[in-house]
Image (cartoon, rainbow, N blue to C red):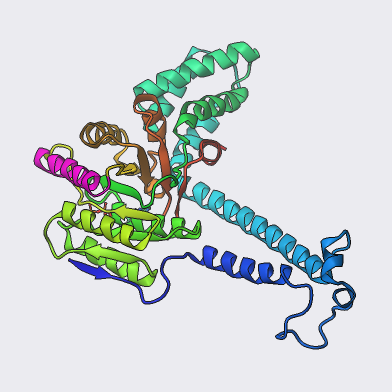
Amino acid sequence: MSEQTPSQDKDAGWGKKLWKALNTDLGELVGSDKPSEAEPAAAPAPAAAASTPSAAAGEEKSFWQKTVEVLNTDVTVLAKDVAQASKEVWQYKLKAGLAKTRDKLGKELATLFGGGQIDEDLYEELETVLLTADMGVDATNHLLKDVRSRVTLAGLKDASELRGALKGALTELIAPLEKPLVVEGHQPFIIMVAGVNGAGKTTSIGKLAKYFQGQGKSVLLAAGDTFRAAAREQLMAWGERNNVTVIAQDGGDSAAVCFDAINAAKARGIDIVLADTAGRLPTQLHLMDEIAKVKRVITKADASGPHEVLLVLDANTGQNALAQVKAFDDALGLTGLVLTKLDGTAKGGVIAGIAKQKPIPLRFIGVGEGIDDLRPFEAKDYVDALIE
Ligand SMILES: Nc1nc2c(ncn2[C@@H]2O[C@H](COP(=O)(O)OP(=O)(O)OP(=O)(O)O)[C@@H](O)[C@H]2O)c(=O)[nH]1
C-alpha cells in the first residue's frame, strides 16, 4: 500500500485558508481598541486614540471596530462578486458545452416554432425532434402531453408560443433531479464512485476534490481502480499537483485500498473520502459482484458509509445510460449520478429520460475536460442553455 501525502497543509482549500487568515486578523483587531505594536506610529487612528475600552463597549464604536466593519463589508461584497462571476462563467461554459445538442434541437425547434397554427402535424414533428435528442419514448410522451395541456390551459394558438410551453414542461420534468449533494453529517463523508470504462470517473474525482476543497473541506482520495494502472498514476499525479493525499496500492484489491483510505481519513480528521473504482460493464457479472463487495467493505470500515454512491455516466451513451443506471442501482443502490461529456454530444436530452424512468438525483454535470468543468446540476440553467 502506498500513500502519497502532500508536503504542505493539504487539509485546507485556498478558500478556507484565506477565510481563516482574514477572520483571524480581523478578530484580533476587534479585540484591540488601539493599534498593535506592529502598526506604524503614524497610523491614522484619531478616533482610536480618543476611544477607551469602556467607550468601545458603549454606543460609540472605536476606529478599529469601524475599520473591521468596512473590511468585512468589502470581503462580503467581494465574495458575492466572485460567486456571481463564477456563476456567469459556468452558465457560459454550460451553453458552450451544450452547443451540439442545442444546435441539433434548436435548429429543428426553430423551424417548428417559426409560426403557423398548432396542429397534430406539429405535435408529430415535435415528437420526432425530442426523440432524436435522445429523450427517450417515455419522456417524449410525457413532454408532449404536458405541452398539450399547457397549450389548452393558456389558450395558445400560434406555434411560436410553443417554445415557452416546452421549456416549462422540460424544466418541470427534470427539476426533481436537482438535489445538490450535501456532504455534512459524517466525518469522513465517504463517496464511492462507479461507472463503465472511460465514463470519466477518475477525472471527475479530481474535479470533485477541487470543488470540495473550494468549499473549505479536506479531501482524501482512494485509488480504488486497481485494474488500470494508469488510473492510479492519474490520481496520484493529480493529488500531487493539488496537495491532496492519495491512498494507493500496486495492483491488488480495490476493497482493501478503500478500507485503508477510510481508516487513514479517520485518523487525520479528513472531511471527505472520494473512492475511485475500476470501470466495468453491467454485463460483466463477476465485476458487478466485485463492486458490491467494495461497498460492503466500505461499510465494514465505517458502519454508516458509504454516504454517497455515485454513478458516472458518459452522456454520449444516450439512452444506454438508462440501462447502466438500472444495473448499477441494482448492484449498489445508487444515491446520485454524474453526467459527463455533455460537451461532446448531441444527446443531452438523455437527462429527460433519466428523470422519467429512474429519477436518481443528478448531482453534477460535466461539460469539458478542465478542472472547473464539473458543477452541480440546475434544471433551469440546463433548459435555458438547451433551448434558447
Ligand atoms: N470532453 C470531456 N471529456 C471528459 C469529461 N469528463 C471526462 N472526460 C475525458 O474522458 C476520458 C476518460 O476519463 P477517465 O476519468 O479516465 O475515465 P474513467 O471512467 O476513470 O476510465 P476507466 O478507469 O477506464 O474506467 C478522459 O480523457 C477525460 O479527460 C467531460 O465532461 N468532457
In the image, residue 111 sits, relative to residue 183, either above or below, namely above
In magenta segment, residue 242: no
Residue shown at the point (45%, 56%) measured from the top left: 211
Q: Nearer the viewer, residue 341 or 103?
A: 341
Please indicate, yes or no, whether residue 77 appears anywhere in the rendered image.
yes
Q: Looking at the rendering, which quadrant does residue 240 occupy?
A: bottom left
Please indicate, yes or no, whether residue 369 appears anywhere in the rendered image.
no
Residue shown at the point (26%, 46%) measured from the top left: 194
Magenta highlight range: 285-302
Q: Locate the N terminus and report the quarter of the image it occupies.
A: bottom left
Residue shown at the point (75%, 66%) measured from the top left: 68
Rendering coords of residue 185 (x, y %): 43, 44
In magenta segment, residue 301: yes
Rendering coords of residue 355 (x, y %): 40, 29
Rendering coords of residue 197 (x, y %): 22, 49
Give the residue furthest to the front: 54
Q: Nearer the viewer, residue 350 or 247?
A: 247
In the image, residue 375 sits, relative to residue 260, either above or below, namely above
In the image, residue 362 sits, relative to residue 367, either above or below, namely above
